[in-house]
Amino acid sequence: MPSYTGPVKDMQFVLHDVLNITETGIPGYDELDADFTNAVLEEASKIASDVLAPLNPVGDTEGCVLENGVVRTPTGFKAAFDQVREGGWTALDCDPDFGGQGLPYLMSTAVGEMMSAGNMAFNMYAGLTHGAYSAIHAHGSDQQKETYLEKMVSCEWTGTMNLTEPHCGTDLGLMRTKAAPQEDGTYKISGQKIFISAGDHDMSDNVIHLVLGKIVGGPEGIKGVSLFIVPKYLVNDDGSLGERNGVSVGKIEEKMGIHGNSTCVMNYDEATGYLLGAEHKGMRAMFTMMNEARLGVGLQGYAQAEVAYQNALEYAKDRLQGRDVTGAKYPEKSADPLIVHPDIRRNLMDQKSFVEGARAFTFWGAHMIDKAHRNEDADADGMISLLTPVIKGFLTDKGFEMATNAQQVYGGHGYIEEWGMSQFARDARIAMIYEGANGVQALDLVGRKLAQDGGKHVMAFFEMVKTFCKENSDVDGMAEFIEPLKAASKDLQAAGMYFMQNGMKNPNNALSGSYDFMHLFGHVCLGLMWARMGKAALEALANGASDTEFYETKIATGKYYMARQLPATSMHLSRIESGADTVMALEAANF
């Protein structure tokens, strides 16, 4: 059975050597000294490795079951959920006024990586609740906050987000769910929603659904969409649970992966709902937590790659196959371990360099979310808005790729279920689809985010890279980081220039290159992260750090990424500059 160990040392390196979090001036960060963060992360690692990871194959094998209208989660899930709740892990970054611990979102992100790597399907129950909590916290009335938030922070009550309908995914303006106003100010919600993660289960006393719907008589299309709180059980004035609401589970979806999460078809039959935020402003309320939610999905992508890599590495060290071409490394054994072979090394280095770069990128993004919220920093908010589709799209694409690469290390055993590697690939696959499919992320990046605020934020990104390169170009040991980063950044700027020059007269020229642009941007971001990590590691060695092996390994891994992965930007630029003609050449009938 696969195992998992939280990468606490690497997380500490990113937090303190690279981001220097205690010196950022963000409120609350001054309390995040290395001893404190280490204590939190070590405990989270124990939960992830000792409690959640052993349940991961159980959830995959058993799945969730709908019995007489009640959803049953896999064996052991409820006891583990109670343990996570009681440990306060669901409340880390929530508002202390509602029972939260008030820690920065960055700490919740680091813990969330380990929980997701340990058991992605399980962690989604708390993750969806956090998203619903965030929306109510941002847009709810005082009464709504008082009614729901404390129980949601503790996960005594869990939450969901209901967007998709059978005929309506990305194009939410097509939705048919109706909300009929009542004299008492409530609404009767009727309609069907599909793909609702954690839609119902037996681990909490109530489920608080956030449901998008159209108020009867309102505007057509997306402008008529509102957001409603629709609890599974109505809540009495004294906070106790009342009668069952008109919401039920139609079925549990049969999925490729994340079997331990109850992905439900939800039926609303004149269920009582309460307007959250303003009428016809449902998308504004829903998008409040999109940066956080999409960063969380990007995290899922590389977290699955991390746990898959850990197991592939151990297998490569243990499995005896063939001899080192330069001479037997273990002549006393019947063969050498897989890890002596260059192609296995290449595969593992691809995985290692991606995961560690992705972690730094995601933590940097979480840090920007904290800076935007806690410092009310508009520039940080603009930067993370620009980078969110890159975090979500690039990290989930590559995360899935690396999970399958880890599976490849096992050869035939990777395809056999008892070794557990296929689950990581199957679970990782959904992250490329939900919370906005990656093609949509690419369109959002090119179609909206590049031009946001007059292009201010992408220009700030270019300036950030340029300044870093200039300041470190003469630093000993940095040339192998700086020169590739410069070249990759020039490719990114050239792609942006192509869109400016060709996208206006033919929008397809921009849109047909959007996916490549998202990946090009992702590589530049990881290149920047590796350059920063390389600098931090060099400085640690120069300052006499005791763990020289860790820092030397970090430098070598970074150099690998810069030499072997970052040159992909040139390929993506060539594709972008080829324009739309070849993409759009065929008539639909000729495909």
Image (cartoon, grey):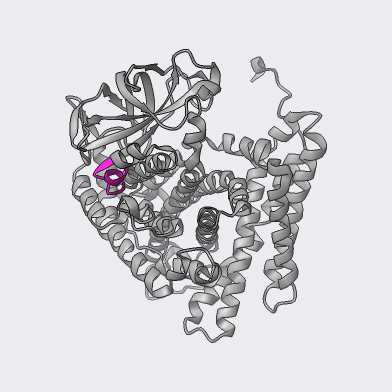
Please identify the residue farthest to the bottom as the structure is shown.
544
Is residue 362 rendered magenta in the image?
no
* Residue in the image at 50% along x and 37% along y: 287
User: In the displayed structure, would residue 150 be above or below residue 278?
Assistant: below
Is residue 156 rendered magenta in the image?
yes
The spot of residue 308 in percent (x, y) is: 41, 54
**As rendered, which of 582 and 239 lies closer to the eye?**
239
On the question of residue 580 being in view, the answer is no
The spot of residue 35 in percent (x, y) is: 38, 75
On the question of residue 431 being in view, the answer is yes
Task: Judge from the rendering whether residue 185 lies leftward or rightward of residue 10; answer left or right.
Answer: left
**As rendered, which of 563 and 416 lies closer to the eye?**
563
User: In the displayed structure, would residue 326 be above or below residue 53?
Assistant: below
**As rendered, which of 342 and 481 lies closer to the eye?**
481
Give the quadrant of the N terminus.
bottom left
Task: Judge from the rendering whether residue 251 lies leftward or rightward of residue 103; answer left or right.
Answer: left
* Residue in the image at 79% along x and 39% along y: 500
Point out the stretch of residues depicted in magenta: 149-158
The spot of residue 543 in percent (x, y) is: 56, 85
